Image: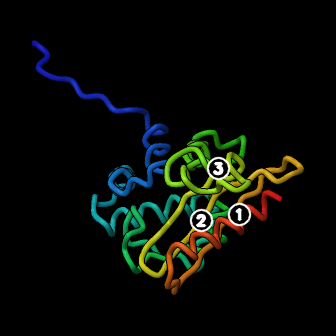
């Protein structure tokens, strides 16, 4: 038969990197739905949340205090912990888990890419790679930083009940910069 059309997709690793770098909630939700389907769950918010939680548990990550309701993190009932986020970053750096590497390589680079392209102009440019999270009253930053001795550190800072998002963002940036020092 004659081919009428063809569709191709970038590899999953590129999609994960693009999602993280650009904070793309549509890609995040689509990947969550595909995770649900691959796990035998319905391609719904609930199915995706169950499938993601199952995969995180299979990785041995600490789920105490976490509550997932979607793939993008936009649901106001979603809850993550600093323990879960830093454990995921550490797991992504494990040489025995190369499939998780896009979790690190997709993180925006301070002063250069994505949601951090205009941040860290006062000292930590290029040293911090992190995913931002911002909702009304909630500001987070989780990622990695190279300290002055060359060690790679994983961190997660979460602030709730914030009233000034720019001040909260500045405080999180200062905390990550302090780790670089």
- Between disc 1 and disc 2, whose residue precedes? 2
The quarter of the displayed image where residue 41 is located: bottom left
* Closer to the eye: label 3 or 1: 1
What is the secondary structure assignment of the residue under circle 2? strand
Q: Is residue 51 left or right of residue 157?
A: left
Which residue in the rendered view is the most extreme toward the front?
122
Q: Is residue 150 left or right of residue 134?
A: right
In the rendered image, residue 177, in percent from the top left (x then y), is placed at 73, 61
Residue to which mark 1 is pinned: 176
Give the total number of marks visible in the rendering.
3
Instruction: Tell me the distance, in whole angstroms, between the alpha carbons under discs 1 and 2.
Output: 8 Å
Closer to the camera, 81 or 179? 179
What is the secondary structure assignment of the residue under circle 3? helix
Q: Is residue 126 above or below residue 55?
A: above
Residue drawn 39% across the image and 32% down it: 10
Category of crowding for the residue at label 3, using alpha-carbon neighbours closer than 10 angstroms: few (below 14), some (14–19), many (at least 20): some
Residue to which mark 3 is pinned: 92
Closer to the camera, 75 or 180? 180
In the rendered image, residue 90, in percent from the top left (x then y), is placed at 70, 55
Residue drawn 50% across the image and 54% down it: 115
Contact check, label 1 and label 2, Cβ < 8 Å = yes
Q: Which mark is residue 141?
A: 2
């Amino acid at each position: 038969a004659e081919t009428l059309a063809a569709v191709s997709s970038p590899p999953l690793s590129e999609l994960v990197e693009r999602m993280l770098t650009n904070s793309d909630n549509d890609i995040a939700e689509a990947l969550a739905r595909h995770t649900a389907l691959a796990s035998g769950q319905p391609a719904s918010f609930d199915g995706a949340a169950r499938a993601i939680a199952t995969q995180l548990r299979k990785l041995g990550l600490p789920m105490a205090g976490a509550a997932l309701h979607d793939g993008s993190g936009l649901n106001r009932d979603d809850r993550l912990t600093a323990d879960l986020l830093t454990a995921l970053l550490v797991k992504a750096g494990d040489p025995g888990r190369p499939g998780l590497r896009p979790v690190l390589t997709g993180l925006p680079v301070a002063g250069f890419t994505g949601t951090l392209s205009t941040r860290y102009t006062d000292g930590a440019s290029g040293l911090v790679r992190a995913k931002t999270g911002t909702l009304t009253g909630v500001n987070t930053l989780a990622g990695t930083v190279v300290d002055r001795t060359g060690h790679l550190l994983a961190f997660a800072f979460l602030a709730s009940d914030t009233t000034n998002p720019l001040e909260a963002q500045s405080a999180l940036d200062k905390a990550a910069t302090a780790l670089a020092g």
